Structure formats: C-alpha cells, structure tokens
Image (cartoon, rainbow, N blue to C red):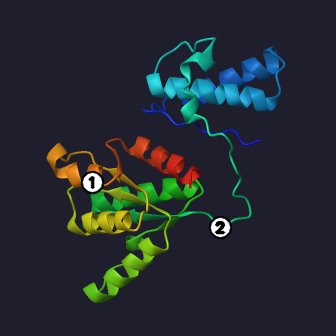
Amino acid sequence: MLVPCLETDNVWPLGSGDVFAAIFSHYWAEKNESAEIAAMQASKATAYYCNTSTLPIPFDIDKFIDSDCIPESYVSREGEAPLQVYLAGPFFNVAERWLIEEVRNELQRSGLKVFSPLHDVGPGKADDVAVKDLKGVDDSQLMFAILNGLDPGTVYEIGYARAKGIPVIVLSQNEKEEDLKMIEGSGCFVENDLVKAIYKTMWVANKL
C-alpha cells in the first residue's frame, strides 16, 4: 500500500515530520492499528497541520480532510521511467543559478527526471540553444517555471508548453497581477511560495 502526501492549499513544513511520527505512533502502538492505517491517519493529520499550521490535531481528523485531496488509487511507478519535468527559468547571475540548482535538486529527490537548460544545454548560439530547449519541452510531461523577473525566454517556454497541453507550475514571487493575466488564464498553476510550488509539482505529477 502506498500512502500519499495529501494535497493541501497551503504548505507549512516546520514540524510536519514530528506530527506524522506522533500520529503514526498513536495509531500503531497505542491503538494497535495496522501500519497502513496508522500511516494514512498520520498523512491526514500532517496535511491538516501543513494546511493550518495549527495544533493540536483534532481527534476526528476525517471531518477536516477534503476527500478530493485523497487520490482514489495510487499506482507505483516502480520499474517505469520517471516523469520528466522541464525546469524553465533565468540563470544569468549567481542568485538565479542558485535557485535553479535548489529546485532541480528537490525535484530529483522527489523522483522526477529533470531537464534543465542550464545543465543539459548550456550556452550557445540562438538557433542551436532554442532547438535543444524546445526538444526538452517536447520530451517532458510537465514544466516547473521560475517566472521571477518575467524573463522573456521563460515566458516563451511557458506558452509553448501550454500550447502542447503540458501542465505548468509557475513560481512567481514579485510580479504584479496584471503581468500574470495570460499565465493564469492559460491554466498554469501559479504559486508564490517555493515549497508549495515544489509540492504542487509532485501532486500534479502523481495525477499524470
């Protein structure tokens, strides 16, 4: 049995591991439930905590969990090729390259294959780089786009991906609502928090 990380509107990770461990121990060691039931209840409690950043956890936790956030089934991808996510974003200075590295590492740790123009293409002439980058989008099942600064290349990649029906998770922390009108209107998932954007990518990937 695979126990999912339940989807939430907000993500407050500080202390979430402690909540999971405490609730799992309660159901498994004190209530003598199976490990599977204990883990599912712990996942529900962790989702409640991450969404509300509130303690204590209610005893009747099921009343506080939206059934829509619990997948009807979770299919293991063991033995299958991992989904590929295209990591779009500017990398023209140290801060931008650092953010690309951090996001790439976290997505890889979550089990996704990452195509990063910074790592997989690098610098070059426009007619060479564009072809390789767009081929990377074509071969990907979803996109994580860092839109801070409204980099033109990133905006183009987002539009190209949406035209092909590829889901796009956008991290946008400083842009005005007016600047995001086409992004939001084309069905992108827009988040202003890095942790939530990474979790959203995993949740979208689980549904593909």
At 46% from the left and 27% from the top, the residue drawn is: 51
At 51% from the left and 55% from the top, the residue drawn is: 107
Q: Which is more foreground, mark 2 or mark 1? A: 1
Category of crowding for the residue at label 2, using alpha-carbon neighbours closer than 10 angstroms: few (below 14), some (14–19), many (at least 20): few
Q: Are marks 2 and 1 in contact (CB under 8 Å)?
A: no
Name the foreground residue: 40 vs 75: 75
Q: Position of residue 118 (x, y in %)?
A: 38, 72
Q: Amino acid at mark 1?
A: Ile
Category of crowding for the residue at label 1, using alpha-carbon neighbours closer than 10 angstroms: few (below 14), some (14–19), many (at least 20): some
Residue 183: assigned label: 1
Q: Is residue 154 above or below residue 64?
A: below
| Side (left or right) of 156 relative to 74 | left
Quadrant position of residue 150: bottom left
Residue 81: assigned label: 2
Q: Position of residue 188 (x, y in %)?
A: 35, 52
Q: Position of residue 49 (x, y in %)?
A: 52, 23
